[in-house]
């Protein structure tokens, strides 16, 4: 369902509002415990950098999911039940060197220097039948502002209705083509995150055959940004670069806050997890955003501060009339330390 691109001029007046501080701190209804450790970057070490989780529709009491740990070159399947999440098989996203089968053209480095081929740096996971999507950060490295081709890719994994993988992961470079043409945020592609407000992908979602890209940064005058695109173009056969221009959606998130993850409701609205664009001392919270009316995000509440843990995952579990159940997961602690929440939808 394509939407008209919103220009900076058209948005300027609408986005002069400042998102009010939430009066409500959300409280989890239960913890969701890992039955064993998810795979970390090093052998026999638990995942401590969980950065994305998406699931198939529920099958009885189970949901089959895919989890990203941003320090890995792989993703890991999981089985989610009430109060438990069980690690399952691992799927390789990238190898130790670039794959000749990756779609699109290798992007020119937007960063200050060129580094090696390292981890995938997966920062978001989404599901739209029959595919899981996993997005690399598409940002320069924190130390040295290096271009690492490994993290400038989007992967998709085809699965059957039980969540079993079919074939190998497909990869594309074409998301970089869109980021270079992404309106107000394009000049920040290739800038350092920490001191240049550099563009970094931090979450993705799918809705109505469209792929939504959530940006941690840049944060501009209290605005955060989403991009909308067609995933079929990104995974079209061949090595031609993408030719389209993404729709850019700006919305009021509060000073120095950007997108940390997002998930789509059935009606196309987006549940957006927001938090620090860099490392500022600002709260994490949740917004309900209608992409057709981005000037009016609904503040759903803030998350309680968590020492040494950063909220980086939001996954919808169940929608009922006026109610929503969802998971929040954390980077910086073992196995995501997932918590389940429930709230009333406006």
Image: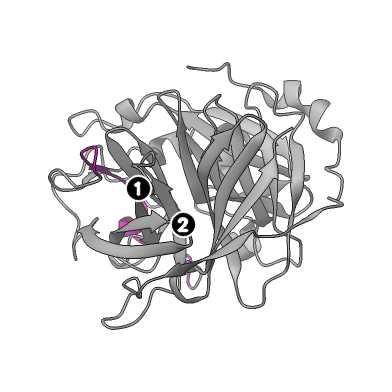
Is residue 208 shown to the viewer in this render? yes
Q: For residue 251, what is the image quadrant?
A: top right
Q: Which residues are magenta?
A: 144-162
User: In the visual, does 20 lie left or right of 283?
Assistant: right
In the image, residue 42 sits, relative to residue 210, either above or below, namely below
Q: Residues within 10 Å of mark 1 (few under 14, many from 20)?
A: few
Is residue 188 shown to the viewer in this render? no
How far from the left and from the top, in percent, is residue 239?
20, 34
In the image, residue 158 sits, relative to residue 338, either above or below, namely above
Residue for badge 1:
108
Residue for badge 2:
82
Q: For residue 271, what is the image quadrant?
A: top right
**Colour pattern of the rendering:** one colour
Residue pictured at 20% horizontal, 44% vertical: 102
- Asked if the magenta segment contains residue 33, the reply would be no
Q: Residues within 10 Å of mark 2 (few under 14, many from 20)?
A: few
Q: Nearer the viewer, residue 252 or 44?
A: 44
Could you tell me how far apart the alpha carbons at marks 2 and 1 are, in whole angstroms? 46 Å
Residue pictured at 87% horizontal, 52% vertical: 23
How far from the left and from the top, in percent, is residue 331?
52, 68
């Amino acid at each position: 369902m394509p939407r008209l691109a919103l220009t900076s001029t058209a948005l300027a007046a609408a986005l002069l509002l400042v998102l009010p501080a939430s009066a409500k701190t959300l409280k989890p209804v239960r913890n969701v415990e890992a039955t064993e450790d998810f795979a970390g970057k090093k052998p026999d070490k638990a995942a401590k950098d969980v950065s994305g989780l998406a699931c198939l529709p529920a099958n009885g009491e189970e949901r089959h999911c895919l989890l990203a740990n941003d320090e890995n070159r792989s993703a890991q399947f999981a089985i989610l039940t009430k109060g438990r999440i069980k690690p399952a098989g691992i799927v390789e996203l990238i190898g130790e060197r670039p794959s000749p089968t990756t779609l699109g053209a290798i992007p020119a480095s937007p960063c200050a220097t060129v580094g090696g081929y390292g981890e995938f740096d997966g920062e978001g996971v989404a599901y739209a039948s029959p595919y899981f999507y996993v997005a690399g950060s598409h940002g320069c490295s924190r130390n040295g502002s290096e271009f690492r081709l490994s993290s400038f890719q989007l992967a998709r994994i085809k699965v059957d209705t039980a969540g079993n993988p079919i074939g190998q992961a497909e990869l594309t470079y074409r998301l970089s083509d869109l980021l270079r043409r992404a309106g107000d945020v394009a000049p920040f592609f290739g800038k350092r995150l920490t001191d240049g407000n550099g563009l970094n992908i931090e979450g993705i979602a799918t809705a109505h055959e469209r792929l939504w890209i959530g940006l941690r940064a840049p944060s501009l005058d209290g605005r955060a940004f989403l991009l909308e695109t067609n995933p079929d173009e990104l995974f079209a056969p061949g090595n031609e670069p993408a030719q389209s221009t993404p729709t850019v959606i700006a919305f009021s998130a509060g000073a120095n806050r950007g997108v940390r993850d997002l998930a789509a409701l059935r009606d196309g609205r987006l549940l957006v997890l927001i938090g620090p664009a860099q490392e500022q001392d600002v709260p994490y919270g949740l917004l309900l955003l209608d992409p057709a009316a981005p000037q009016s995000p609904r503040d759903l509440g803030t998350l309680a501060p968590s020492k040494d843990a950063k909220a980086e995952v939001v996954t919808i579990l169940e929608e009922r009339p006026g109610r929503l159940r969802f998971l929040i997961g954390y980077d910086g602690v073992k196995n995501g330390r997932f918590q389940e929440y429930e709230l009333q939808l406006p």
